[in-house]
Image (cartoon, coloured by chain):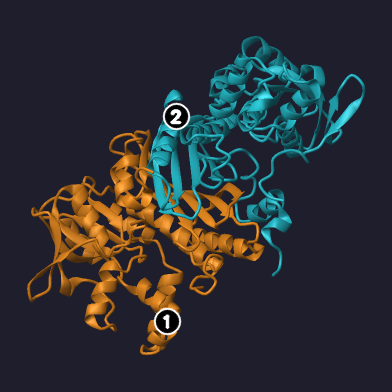
Chain colours: A cyan, B orange
Amino acid sequence: MGILIKDLGERGLLPILQKFCPPGIVGDDGAVILLDPDRQLVVSTDVLVDGVHLSVGLARPNLITTSGADAGWRAATANLSDLAAMGADPLGITVGLGIPETCPLDLITDLYQGLYDCLQLHRTVIWGGDICRSPVLTLSITALGQASPHQVIYRHRAQVGDLILTSGIHGASRAGLECLSHPEWGQAFPNHCRQTWIRAHQRPRPRLDLLPALRSLPQGTRISGMDSSDGLADAVIQLCQASGVGGQLHRENLPLIPELEPSLALEWGLYGGEDFELVICVDPVAADTLIQTSPFRIIGTIIPQPGVTLETGEGNLTISDHQSFQHFG
Amino acid sequence: MGILIKDLGERGLLPILQKFCPPGIVGDDGAVILLDPDRQLVVSTDVLVDGVHLSVGLARPNLITTSGADAGWRAATANLSDLAAMGADPLGITVGLGIPETCPLDLITDLYQGLYDCLQLHRTVIWGGDICRSPVLTLSITALGQASPHQVIYRHRAQVGDLILTSGIHGASRAGLECLSHPEWGQAFPNHCRQTWIRAHQRPRPRLDLLPALRSLPQGTRISGMDSSDGLADAVIQLCQASGVGGQLHRENLPLIPELEPSLALEWGLYGGEDFELVICVDPVAADTLIQTSPFRIIGTIIPQPGVTLETGEGNLTISDHQSFQHFG
């Protein structure tokens, strides 16, 4: 039979497929196409499959943690978040939809309503797409954005001495999922916590609101960045690997959920995923500006030694990506 | 249960989903986004599902009419053809891939090789994308192109008195499919016919080569157009409906396969699909220029009465879209 996809995993397959792309293109949240000296087109594609990323109830009717509208909203957020991570303003999205014939129309209109509502909040639109019959509900979204060349944010530019910053709370989406899939677990927490977490899971926001602060830094400021859609640990590891450096995180500075037992807060904060915050690396002067003008906070430092460690106050832990979300393997 | 997708069909679902898009956007082969006064971005999305559009052998192992490389090539052609139909030069494509875990790696690399080879022939590239696990092999391609605003071709501009033109032979891809799926049928024809038809099916070409001829028409020439990916009949019907006019085709002028029995040649020419030729409507002066400078030929006339008829020499037949390709229903 030769090699099967499950033998490789997503990270094994990616480098093989990258050989079919122009060099230097792949590895960020989106691709950057130079349209003219003043304008870059940023393009990002996401595929969501019911039962894998979506749980809208067709594939797994007993695990309905997301309504059609929530699934649409989250798909829009995931794609706008990729644009935010690249420093680009949204131009719009296209939607490729594979639909089972037995799918209720209401589910599809709910999905589009969720997409529409999230896009409208960020003043952007659906530019059409394609629909076709499929045994499994599949949503493939391509987001288009634009930025000036000096505004585009890549992953590979972090340098030793840079500080690592992130926005928002990490772990909230994971806690919201737990409230939905194990309601008895959530009963131990105040109602306002449960509502906040569930909202973080069902209606996450892309951090396009952070772009003005990043753009107000002096022109020429070197920013590396990506979003934390696959978890905070994954984002820091990816940024360090792409830049050929290492990272040291400080546990006391991580934006975790204070209401949770500390080890659970740390686990979900590092590996929960789907928080759609930005994780960036900038020099200390730029970092100082950002923490005063925006919701970014400093969580660590870029160091020469490869790998990512967590300084706990009682020694250093190595942060591996074993727990981070992988689509295969 | 309410309404199911199968109750609506693709054409019933489209107008419902169009309500979530900006007015005037949907209805062409791609969406047109104004970037600046001199440049339009043209975006087109296609979803291909194994067993529905692709027959690469995972979903239907007994019906292998297309290798992975051929499937990739055809997917690239379908998307570049949408750009050609809009009058746009390709900027590149993104690929969203849903893959079963048991899929052989070779099939995926073959698919990408086919995409790559077709794109390279047209001097364009894959700008990354996304891969994820899926129970069914799904390929979602978004093609990006650009054109000057006056070069963009829409469907809705045909006017009474325009002539209908098309390029190439229609029905060849369908004949190629027949040769592959029923080899005994093909034995009745010379080898060079079979090879030509099979090549038309497995390695179709987008008609980007026709854009220079269209652009050499005087600026301001009104061109309506689309591609014949869903069949020649469908293309003429869609152009007429979008423009609020009717069409009369002349049987003796249709570019059919001469070697076939005439009624079969007509059926496959009108309804076969996947020939990826261009179908356009222009005024008679422009039509006269095009037939002298390019492979376009005149096949009919735009008339006021709605509907499309075929003048056979022995009376008029109504051309319905009942036989044309629909993904649902």
Number of marks in picture = 2
Q: Quadrant of residue B35?
A: top left
Please name whichever residue, B126 or B28, is drawn nearer the observer in this view of the structure. Answer: B28
Residue that badge 1 annotates: B182
Structural crowding at the residue carrying mark 1, measured as other residues with C-alpha within 10 Å and reported as few (<14), some (14–19) or many (≥20): few
Q: What element carries label 2?
A: helix
Please name whichever residue, B62 or A15, is drawn nearer the observer in this view of the structure. Answer: B62
Residue at 52 percent of width and 40 percent of height: A56
Residue A86 visible: yes
Q: What amino acid is at disc 1?
A: His
Give the chain of mark 2: A
Q: In which quarter of the image is residue B270?
A: bottom left
Residue A8: give x, y in percent of width and height: 72, 55
Residue A244 versus residue A198 in the image, above or below: below
Give the chain of mark 1: B
Q: In this view, does A327 lie to the left or right of B28?
A: right
Residue that badge 2 annotates: A119
Q: What element carries label 1?
A: loop
